[in-house]
Image (spheres, rainbow, N blue to C red):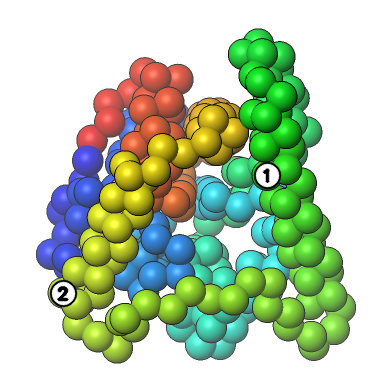
Amino acid sequence: MDANYDDPRITGEHLRTIDAPTGTVTLVGVVHDHPASVFRVRSVIADRDPHALALELPPLSLPIFERYAEDTRTPPVFGGEMSAAIQASTADRVVGIDGPTLPFLRRLAATLCREAGSLGTVRGVFDGLASVTKNALRCRLAGSLAAVTSIRMEVDSPVTYATDRTDSPERQAENERHQIERARAVMDAFEPSRASSFDDEVRETHMADRLAELRGDGDVVAVVGRHHLDRVAERLDAELGGADR
């Protein structure tokens, strides 16, 4: 893990680094739309100057976040930490590493068959997949419109917190830590459904596989939800046989 930063918004608890002969993968854990997370991704990307930037987004959704990143304001008004990451990056490649994609769907189907989940689990998984696919298609449409017109569609409402980027780094970091702890408390109190756990497992394995492929391009910075950070790092470390720091 890396902790060579003085700013409380950039600490080792939010970062994982996996070294491999062909390049280093730095995972940055984020809380969606949080100002501390936006600052963190911008700072780490500027520091690492990666060859590839990987985002926890479906490839279908990527174009709208690229349009958001063209904002003259820093960070961009829309798109949260994802558009902020794109804006801050000079990487040769910017890619979405989440599903749905054809390889993701093949992995999902194979895992469902192998584990022989209950009918309720299968239904829950496909309900979630349908929702994610619908949102990704809506993002794709918004990106296509933005590319040929001056229309900028907001595909989801930004999350607001009891802090913003004008507050001190300490206040932002404290509020973000509170959000993470509250999410963990909810998860501990209410065991997630098998469908939800199943979906997370498939997504995290898929993202780790995509990152293992990308590291052949050189150094990679990947922006993922804080909830996924440790498990993606563990899967990637196992695939690459690297040293997780």
Callout 1 environment at 10 Å: few (<14), some (14 to 19), or many (20+)? some
Q: Residue visible at 73% across and 79% down?
A: 153
Nearer to me, 162 or 17: 162
Residue 25 drawn at (x, y percent): 40, 39
Mark nearer the N terminus (1 vs 2) = 1
Q: Give the residue at mark 2.
A: 170
Q: Of helix, strand and loop, which one carries label 1?
A: helix
Residue 207 drawn at (x, y percent): 55, 36
Quarter of image, res 168: bottom left
* Amino acid on which the number 1 mark rests in the picture: Gly
Quick one: quadrant of the C terminus? top left
Quarter of image, res 154: bottom right
Residue 33 shows up from this direction: yes
170 over 61 or under it: above or below: below
Quick one: quadrant of the N terminus? top left
Q: CA distance from mark 1 to mark 2?
A: 36 Å
Q: Residue visible at 52% across and 36% down?
A: 193
Q: Of helix, strand and loop, which one carries label 2?
A: helix
